[in-house]
Image (tube, rainbow, N blue to C red):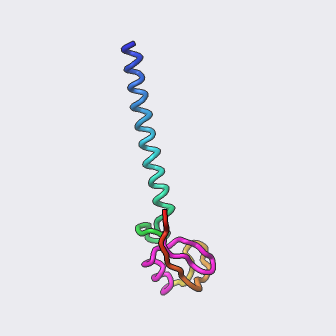
Amino acid sequence: AKDALARQVVQLREANRALGSQAHDARESLDSMTKCFICQQDERTVVAEPCHHLGMCNTCAEEVRQTSGECPICREEIHGLYKGVVLS
């Protein structure tokens, strides 16, 4: 009975480690989906028109407007930028 209990403890510890790793991976995946496509630091808060891609933070959007003028996701010419807040 003591050996069986020890095996269960080991199995539970391994399962706990695996779940912790999965949670970490999920957090990283979520961060990559909400961070700016360009700098990967700030939250995506700007929608490009006319393609409607939500991919840039305010700072990067202004830089893109002043340089290439193209959406970094689809390369369509940007006619306008709409700034807002992404609610989670």
User: In this view, which residue lies farthest toward the top?
Assistant: 1
Magenta stretch containing residue 51, yes or no? yes
Residue 59 part of the magenta-drawn span: yes
In the rendered image, residue 54, in percent from the top left (x then y), is placed at 55, 71
Residue 17 lies left or right of residue 53; in this view the side is left
Is 79 in front, or is 72?
79
> Measuring 36% from the left and 14% from the top, which residue is drawn there?
2
Q: Does 19 appear above or below 55? A: above
Residue at (38%, 15%) from the top-left corner? 3
Location of residue 64 in the rendering, given as x and y in whole percent from the top left corner: 49, 81
Q: Is residue 21 left or right of residue 54?
A: left
The residue that appears at 56% across and 81% down in the rendered structure is 70
User: In the rendered image, which quarter is residue 63 located in?
Assistant: bottom left
Q: Position of residue 81 (x, y in %)?
A: 54, 82
61 lies above or below 7: below
**Residue drawn at point x = 40 percent, y = 38 percent:** 17
Front position in the image: 75 or 17: 17
Q: Is residue 70 left or right of residue 12?
A: right
Residue stretch in magenta: 45-67
Residue found at the very far front of the displayed protein:
87
